[in-house]
Image: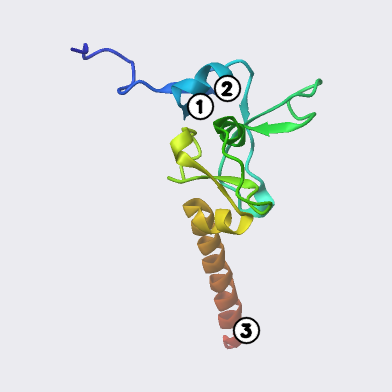
């Protein structure tokens, strides 16, 4: 029986950390854990002009800092390790089935196309919906100011 003060997560999670203070991590399967901890990983910053909100674990193999050299995205590398090739040339993205970018277990990943990846993402769709709502509100505000009587 577990002690009530035991800090170990239940069930046991294999975590690969993305910072030196162990505050951000992804969860992996046991078979990918040893492979994942051999490198220093970091979380990318979401791209502001693409309504990005997701953060992915990645690394570079270049010297001179983490932003130089070829970029390796953790969940894509897990999919390659899984040994399942993409079905065709259009399947170049790896999707998280539960839309949780911190769950990098093999059973949660699948090859997908760019289009399907955009439509599957709850966060991306929410951000896009919010953008459309803001655009409609701005257009409505402009109309009401234009039609308002001069005072």
Q: Secondary structure at mark 2?
A: loop
Q: What whole-number distance in Å separates the C-alpha atoms at marks 2 and 1?
A: 6 Å
Q: Residues within 10 Å of mark 2 (few under 14, many from 20)?
A: some
Residue located at (63% from left, 54% from top) = 114
Residue located at (54% from left, 54% from top) = 124
Q: Secondary structure at mark 3?
A: helix
Return the residue nearer the eye: 118 or 140.
118
State left or right for residue 147 relative to residue 105.
Answer: right
- Per the rendering, the mark at residue 24 is 1
Q: Is residue 22 visible?
A: no
Q: What whole-number distance in Å separates the C-alpha atoms at marks 1 and 3?
A: 49 Å
Q: Are marks 2 and 1 in contact (CB under 8 Å)?
A: yes
- Compare marks 3 and 2 and give the one earlier in the sequence: 2
Q: Residues within 10 Å of mark 1 (few under 14, many from 20)?
A: some
- Compare marks 1 and 3 and give the one earlier in the sequence: 1
Q: What whole-number distance in Å separates the C-alpha atoms at marks 3 and 2?
A: 51 Å
Q: Is residue 125 visible?
A: yes
The image quadrant where one finds the C terminus is: bottom right
State left or right for residue 81 relative to residue 28.
Answer: right
Q: Are marks 1 and 3 in contact (CB under 8 Å)?
A: no
- Compare marks 2 and 1 and give the one earlier in the sequence: 2
State left or right for residue 132 relative to residue 50.
Answer: left
- Per the rendering, the mark at residue 19 is 2
Q: Secondary structure at mark 1?
A: loop
Q: Position of residue 10 (x, y in %)?
A: 30, 22
Q: Position of residue 25 (x, y in %)?
A: 50, 26
Residue 142 placement: quadrant: bottom right
Q: How is the image coloured?
A: rainbow
- Per the rendering, the mark at residue 146 is 3
Residue located at (68% from left, 32% from top) = 72
């Amino acid at each position: 029986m577990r002690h009530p003060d035991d800090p170990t997560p239940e069930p046991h999670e294999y975590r690969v950390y993305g910072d030196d203070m162990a505050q951000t991590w992804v969860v992996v399967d046991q078979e990918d854990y040893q492979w994942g901890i051999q490198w220093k990983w970091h979380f990318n910053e979401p791209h502001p002009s693409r309504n990005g909100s997701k953060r992915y674990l990645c690394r570079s193999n270049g010297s001179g800092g983490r932003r130089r050299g070829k970029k390796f995205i953790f969940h894509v590398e897990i999919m390659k390790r899984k040994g399942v090739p993409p079905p065709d040339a259009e399947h170049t993205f790896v999707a998280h089935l539960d839309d949780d970018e911190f769950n990098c277990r093999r059973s949660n990943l699948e090859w997908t196309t760019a289009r399907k990846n955009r439509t599957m993402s709850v966060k991306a769709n929410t951000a896009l919906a919010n953008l459309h709502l803001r655009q409609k509100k701005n257009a409505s505000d402009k109309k009401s100011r234009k039609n308002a009587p001069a005072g």
